[in-house]
Image (tube, helix red, strand yellow):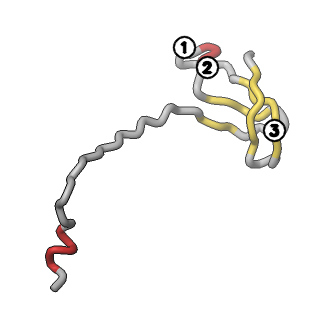
């Protein structure tokens, strides 16, 4: 099993985490990790953030248009 060091919120410190045997076929790249000290499980998943940005020069926000 592959081990890596991460912060465990239960142990409140940096602990070794290991990848348990994976039934999904991920092997060493399994997103599930288990703390070797307390047994707490963590799931690592990538987070995708989409940022929409538009440039409006000289335009007034709709809330400001309604204010008298």
Element at label 1: loop
Q: Camera-side residue: 42 or 59?
A: 59
Q: CA distance from mark 3 to mark 1?
A: 28 Å
Which residue lies under the disc numbered 2?
22
Q: Residue furthest front?
A: 58
Write down the residue under mark 1.
25
State the residue at coordinates (72%, 32%).
34
Rate crowding at label 2 as few (under 14), some (14 to 19) or many (20 or more) other CA atoms within 10 Å.
Answer: few
Give the image location of residue 18, x and y in percent. 74, 25
Residue 2 spot, x, y in % from top left: 73, 17
What is the C-alpha distance between the residues marked 2 and 1? 6 Å
Q: Nearer the viewer, mark 3 or mark 2?
A: 3
Horizontally, is 30 left or right of 50 in the view?
right
Q: Quadrant of the C terminus?
A: bottom left
Q: Position of residue 6 (x, y in %)?
A: 74, 34
Residue 62 in which image quadrant: bottom left
16 sits left or right of 66 in the view:
right
Residue highlighted by disc 3: 14
- When asked about the image quadrant of residue 16, the answer is top right
Q: Quadrant of the N terminus?
A: top right
Kind of element beneath mark 2: loop
Secondary structure of the residue carrying tag 3 is strand
3 or 1: tag closer to the N-terminus: 3
In the foreground, 30 or 23:
30
Q: Is residue 19 above or below residue 44?
A: above
CB of mark 2 within 8 Å of CB of mark 1?
A: yes
């Amino acid at each position: 099993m592959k081990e890596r060091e991460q912060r465990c919120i239960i142990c409140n410190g940096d602990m070794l985490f290991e990848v348990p045997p994976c039934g999904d076929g991920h092997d060493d790249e399994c997103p599930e990790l288990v703390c070797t000290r307390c047994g707490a499980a963590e799931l690592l998943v990538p987070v995708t953030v989409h940022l929409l940005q538009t440039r409006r020069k000289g335009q007034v926000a709709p809330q400001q248009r309604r204010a008298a």
